[in-house]
Image (cartoon, helix red, strand yellow):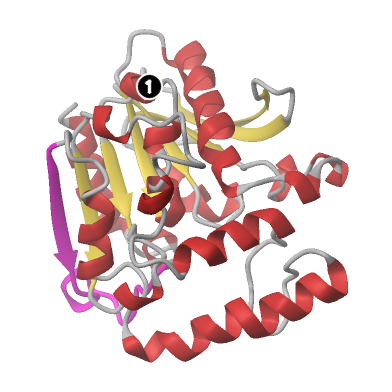
């Protein structure tokens, strides 16, 4: 088995917010560079098995925590002011800059889990990414999700979420939410978008300015899993439509086809998914 070394890095976003990151590399000279952008509430350590696999296969891999999450909590200073868009407008570009400093002339590619695929159009340096592999990426609009998930979502938005905001002024890991604590402003933005049929599309010409969704041209391959109640064929297609200038494709996979009993919304990054990981790695290598 190829040995992989990890190095923890401290990045600094344009507004001064410190971001924790980890670099994975093997002893062999890397052939490509990969940035992994997390889903909402997932710390970078969740992706360590996936990152290790890519690095063992010849990639230089960077994982990082968005502000307010994991190692980027920043002692909670400014936590209540974090908005969803800060992750795309400030944190994702910082990860690209950090990888440029490490990768030299290697092509830089991107793996996005869930919300990690939502904000490419907010990144001022999105053109530096050669390819995007979306994993379980779909809009957050509840109507595009599987009906069996609707009761759980409305409980999260208006039951658990409302109580946690009132009681703690954040969405804590209680009552069924297993992710990292979420800032109040960020949660309210997420909830608002998820109740709009167009998700954040209605705000592109208002609150999301400046944005460049029409200018994203790097190819995007989107992996959708048949047992994922959130990133469905419908919500996945609606998200891809946000990037009209990019060549996009959707790859629908069943757990059985990948030798699994369940994948769901987060299982693609759990140990045992090497078959899927290699498929993603091979597609990224075409850059």
Horizontal side of residue 166 vs 204, given as left or right: right
Nearest the camera: 192 or 220?
A: 192
Q: Please report the bounds of the magenta region as a residue range.
A: 247-265
User: Which residue, given by chain and number where applicable, does mark 1 sit on?
Assistant: 28
Q: Is residue 56 visible?
A: no
Vertical placement of residue 184 versus 15, above or below:
below
Residue 262 covered by magenta stretch: yes
Residue at the image position 75 percent from the left and 45 percent from the top: 81
Q: Could you tell me if residue 264 is visible in this image?
A: yes
Element at label 1: loop
Instruction: Report the front residue among 90 and 280.
Output: 90
Q: Is residue 23 magenta?
A: no
- Most extreme residue toward the top is 105
Determine the residue positioned at 29% across, 21% down: 31
Residue 135: where, in percent of width, then height?
33, 55
Could you say which quadrant of the image residue 60 lies in?
A: top left
Residue 167: where, in percent of width, then height? 86, 75
Residue 52, relative to residue 13: is it above or below?
A: below
Q: Quadrant of residue 281?
A: top left
């Amino acid at each position: 088995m190829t040995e992989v070394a990890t190095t923890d890095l401290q990045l600094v976003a344009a507004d001064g917010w410190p971001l924790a990151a980890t670099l994975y590399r093997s002893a062999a000279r890397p052939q490509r560079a990969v940035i992994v952008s997390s889903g909402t509430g997932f710390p970078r350590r969740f992706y360590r098995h996936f990152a290790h696999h890519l690095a063992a296969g010849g990639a230089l891999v960077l994982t990082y925590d968005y502000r307010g999450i994991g190692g980027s909590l920043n002692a909670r200073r400014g936590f209540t002011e974090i908005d969803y868009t800060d992750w795309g407008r400030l944190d994702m570009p910082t990860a690209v800059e950090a990888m440029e400093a490490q990768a030299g002339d290697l092509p830089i590619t991107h793996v996005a889990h869930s919300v990690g695929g939502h904000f490419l159009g907010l990144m001022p340096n999105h053109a530096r990414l050669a390819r995007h592999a979306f994993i379980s990426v779909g809009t957050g609009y509840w109507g595009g999700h599987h009906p069996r998930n609707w009761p759980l979502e409305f409980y999260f938005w208006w039951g658990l979420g409302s109580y946690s905001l009132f009681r703690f002024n954040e969405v804590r890991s209680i009552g069924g939410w297993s992710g990292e604590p979420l800032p109040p402003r960020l949660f309210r933005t997420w909830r608002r978008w998820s109740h709009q049929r167009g998700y954040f599309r209605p705000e592109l010409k208002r609150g999301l300015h400046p944005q460049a969704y029409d200018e994203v041209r790097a190819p995007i391959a989107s992996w959708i899993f048949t047992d994922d109640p959130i990133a469905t064929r419908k919500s996945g297609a609606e998200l891809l439509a946000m990037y009209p200038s990019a060549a996009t494709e959707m790859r629908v996979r069943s757990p059985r086809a990948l030798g699994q009993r369940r994948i769901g919304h987060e299982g693609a990054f759990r140990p045992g998914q090497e078959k899927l990981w290699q498929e993603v790695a091979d597609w990224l290598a075409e850059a």
